[in-house]
Image: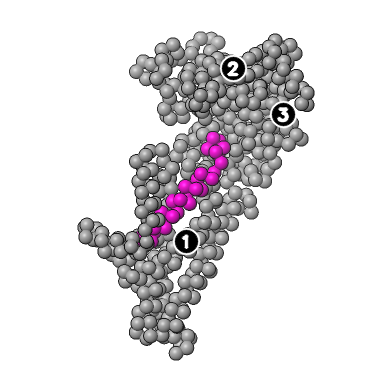
């Protein structure tokens, strides 16, 4: 069977898999950004308990395998009474993992904003929270956008692991088709191309657009 | 903790200074930057601070803006303690809330302008009035445009700082500080980072403030000519102390102390 016949026959299933992958990606990205922001800010906190919490979190989620984390959330947590359905477990694991990496980017981005910006914000008597939200974070965001682009692609590719807890994403659907047809080259070939297209023609252009948008806001464009 | 019993909770009387440093000490580790500083600035007075680098002059402004904590003594602004607050009948170091309340009287301009790069000139000026003072956007806009007019930057109000020259940025920074309606304005080497040909546009704005407003101003500067022109009083700092102070005519025309004479002649030779 050539690749076109293969596509004609299986595109509805592949498409549903792509839908799940995109949904997982978007949900994991939202969670990951929220976690990154929280942990990045906590790590900069002068409160030792809060800082310690962020450091521990980042260490655990960066220092161990994403797959093991996924299995923990899906298979081990229920043993302690926290049952999560597999779809939620999927994006939660990926999002929390990416959030740990993102936390370092947030922290680095905040530290890269010149000290004079803090001082100028204090000189117009802004509260510490407003200084952070209105002055520092917008500038930190611009500094950390390029590495965030990389992280988003890592995240997209990381979602393929959720097929291992039977979430019917692109990878899971592909494996099913492969198992029933033994058309491995066509099945995994199509999956390869779709992941590439998603990364190269959706995620990357979106991040570039975001960078240009932010540059315009800075009056640099 | 330091015994604050000798310090009043409020300075009262007819000639209460707008700014008062009382025995203020500042050190970094074992390095003493300011040693028992006493300095009163009356309302509407323009005081210039000159001296060699490392003499503690910028620290004076930064302590007043509460960018630096003091290690001893007390600073009063408009008669009320800035660095301390009354508690249980005594004075204790100020908390964030007290600082926020008292800081409202003070505005500052920096050597490197420090405009917010993600905002236009107008937005820079409106930021404080809208998000700190809580006045309406329309009112903040009127106030900011008026000030940008004053500093000659109204035609650039929608530009971002990256599109402005150093002199233009500094003028916007002055407008931004004035938009908060401070009683005391601090200028920290505001012309030091500027190209020589644009220094005049900034000094002219400051000159205008001396003439038009009843603002109290403290200025750290290396421009002796400018300090001489516009100051009511000039303080020469040396080694963390005020070595000599007086009217510009006295200090520049007839300095009494040897170090002042040495410093001024060294500066003149450099020009």
Q: Residue furthest front?
A: B30
Q: Measured from the top left, where is residue B28 in percent x and y?
A: 51, 26
Identify the residue position indicated by label 3 in the image.
Answer: B204
Tell me, yes or no, whether the highlighted magenta stretch contains residue A105.
yes
Location of residue A16 by image quarter? bottom left
Between residue B139 and residue B171, name the one nearer to us.
B171
Q: Measured from the top left, where is residue A85 in percent x and y?
A: 28, 64
Mark 2 and mark 3 on one chain: yes
Task: Specify whether residue B184 is in view.
Answer: no
Badge 3: residue crowd in 10 Å (few <14, some 14–19, many ≥20): some
Badge 1: residue crowd in 10 Å (few <14, some 14–19, many ≥20): many
Q: Is residue B150 above or below residue A166?
A: above
- Which mark is drawn over residue A65? none
Chain of the residue where label 2 is placed in the rendered structure = B
Q: Is residue A92 above or below residue B15?
A: below
Q: Measured from the top left, where is residue A157 in percent x and y?
A: 44, 67
SS of the residue at dot 2? strand
- Report the predominant secondary structure element of the magenta stretch: helix
Name the image quarter holding the N terminus of chain B.
Answer: top left
Q: Nearer the viewer, mark 1 or mark 3?
A: 1
The span picked out in magenta is: A93-120
1 and 3 marks in contact (CB < 8 Å): no
Inter-mark Cα distance, 2 to 3: 30 Å
Chain of the residue where label 3 is placed in the rendered structure = B
Identify the residue position indicated by label 2 in the image.
Answer: B241
- Which mark is drawn over residue A152? 1
State how many labels appear.
3
Q: Is residue A206 above or below residue A60?
A: below
SS of the residue at dot 1? helix
Residue A5 placement, left or right of B224: left
| Residue under the point 43% across and 48% down | A40
Q: Residue furthest bottom?
A: A1
């Amino acid at each position: 069977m050539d690749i076109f016949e293969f596509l004609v026959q299986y595109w509805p299933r592949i498409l549903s898999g792509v839908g799940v992958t995109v949904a997982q990606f978007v949900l994991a990205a939202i969670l990951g950004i929220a976690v990154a922001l929280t942990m990045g800010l906590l790590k900069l906190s002068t409160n030792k308990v809060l800082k310690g919490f962020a450091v521990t979190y980042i260490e655990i989620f960066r220092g161990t395998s994403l797959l093991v984390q996924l299995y923990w959330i899906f298979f081990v947590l229920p043993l302690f009474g926290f049952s999560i359905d597999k779809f939620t477990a999927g994006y939660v694991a990926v999002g929390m993992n990416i959030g740990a990496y993102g936390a370092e980017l947030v922290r680095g981005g905040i530290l890269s904003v010149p000290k004079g910006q803090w001082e100028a914000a204090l000189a117009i008597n802004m509260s510490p929270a407003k200084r952070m939200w209105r002055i520092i974070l917008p500038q930190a965001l611009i500094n950390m956008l390029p590495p965030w682009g990389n992280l988003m692609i890592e995240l997209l590719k990381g979602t393929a692991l959720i097929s291992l807890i039977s979430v019917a994403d692109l990878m899971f659907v592909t494996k099913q088709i492969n198992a029933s047809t033994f058309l491995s080259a066509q099945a995994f070939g199509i999956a390869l191309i779709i992941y590439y297209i998603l990364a190269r023609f959706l995620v990357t252009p979106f991040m570039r657009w975001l960078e240009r948008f932010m540059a315009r806001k800075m009056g640099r464009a | 903790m330091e015994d604050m019993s000798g310090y009043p909770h409020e300075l009262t009387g007819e000639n209460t200074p707008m700014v008062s440093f009382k025995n203020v000490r500042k050190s970094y580790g074992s390095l003493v930057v300011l040693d028992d500083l006493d300095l009163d600035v009356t309302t509407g007075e323009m005081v210039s601070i000159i001296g060699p680098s490392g003499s503690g002059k910028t620290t004076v402004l930064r302590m007043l803006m509460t960018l630096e904590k003091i290690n001893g003594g007390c600073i009063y602004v408009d008669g009320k303690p800035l660095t301390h607050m009354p508690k249980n009948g005594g004075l204790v170091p100020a908390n964030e809330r007290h600082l926020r309340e008292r800081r409202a009287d003070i505005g500052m301009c920096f050597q490197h302008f420090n405009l917010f790069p993600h905002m236009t000139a107008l937005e820079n000026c409106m930021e404080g009035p809208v998000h700190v003072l809580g006045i309406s956007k329309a009112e903040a806009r009127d106030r900011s445009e008026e000030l940008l007019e004053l500093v000659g930057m109204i035609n650039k109000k929608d530009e971002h700082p990256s599109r402005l020259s150093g002199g233009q940025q500094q003028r916007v920074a002055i407008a931004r500080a004035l938009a908060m309606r401070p009683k005391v304005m601090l200028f920290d080497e505001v012309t030091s980072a500027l190209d020589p040909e644009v220094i005049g546009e900034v000094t002219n704005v400051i000159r205008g403030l001396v003439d038009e407003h009843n603002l109290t101003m403290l200025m750290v500067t290396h421009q002796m000519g400018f300090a001489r022109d516009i100051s009511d009083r000039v303080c020469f700092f040396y080694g963390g102390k005020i070595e000599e102070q007086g009217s510009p005519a006295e200090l520049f025309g007839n300095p009494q102390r040897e170090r002042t004479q040495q410093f001024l002649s060294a500066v003149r030779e450099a020009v």
